[in-house]
Amino acid sequence: MAEQVVVSLFPCSFSGGGRRVPVGSRVVVKLGWEARERGLVQSFLTAQTTTVALNGMAPTDISDSYGPIEPAPNGNFRSHVHFDTGVTLGDGQALQVDGVMALSHLVPDGLTLADEDTHRPQFFGPETPFTFGCRITTP
């Protein structure tokens, strides 16, 4: 049986867009949302539509797959989704994972301030979906 390897999509996407895994890895991708308050995470969950596409295929809607809101070790709150791609990578193989998080209405970031002087929160909304990609390869 193949060993599952969890690849966190945000760190992969925002640190070069690539991750190497051992040959024979069954790829599970992970993403989530974190904020200072439980209600801010709930607001995100209510507003989001999250999809992932594998190797350019049609996107899969994983919006209903987020886990319960839980406390994070740093005192924040978070919710994650783990998506089993069903792909086990052989020697020299690759898997391209592309995702989109779209929001139906404005949602406060919950961690980042838009303006340090006034302490106004950073908001995300329908006009700017989050897009991310990660190319997962074996050596």
Image (cartoon, rainbow, N blue to C red):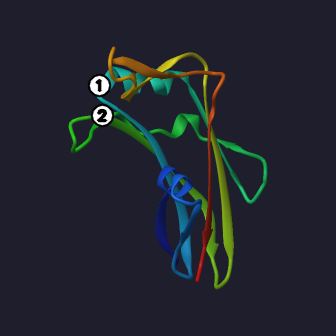
User: Which numbered tag is attached to residue 45?
Assistant: none
Which residue appears farthest toward the front when viewing the image? 117
Answer above or below: position of 43 versus 94.
above
Q: Which residue: 34% across, 33% down?
A: 69
Q: Which residue: 64% across, 85% down?
A: 91
The kind of secondary structure element at disc 1 is loop
Which residue appears farthest toward the right when viewing the image? 57
Q: Amino acid at mark 1?
A: Glu
**Mark 2 and 1 residues: CB-CB less than 8 Å, in contact?**
yes
Left or right of 67 in this view: 96: right
Answer above or below: position of 24 versus 37.
below
Q: Tell me the crowding category of disc 1: few under 14, some 14 to 19, or many 20 or more residues within 10 angstroms, Cα based.
A: some
Q: Which residue: 52% across, 40% down?
A: 65
Q: Amino acid at mark 2?
A: Phe
Q: Where residue 72 appears, x then y in whole percent?
A: 26, 41
Depth check: 108 or 113 in front?
113
Answer above or below: position of 106 versus 27.
above
Left or right of 38 in this view: 9: right
User: Which numbered tag is attached to residue 37?
Assistant: 1
Question: How far is mark 2 from mark 1, CA to CA?
Answer: 6 Å
The kind of secondary structure element at disc 2 is strand
Q: Where residue 29 appears, x then y in whole percent?
A: 53, 56
Q: Where residue 100 appears, x then y in whole percent?
A: 64, 40
Depth check: 5 or 120 in front?
120
Labels in figure, total: 2
Q: Which residue: 63% across, 28% down?
A: 128
Q: Where residue 9 appears, x then y in whole percent?
A: 52, 53
Q: Tell me the crowding category of disc 2: few under 14, some 14 to 19, or many 20 or more residues within 10 angstroms, Cα based.
A: many
Q: Earlier in the sequence, mark 2 or mark 1?
A: 1
User: Which numbered tag is attached to residue 77?
Assistant: 2
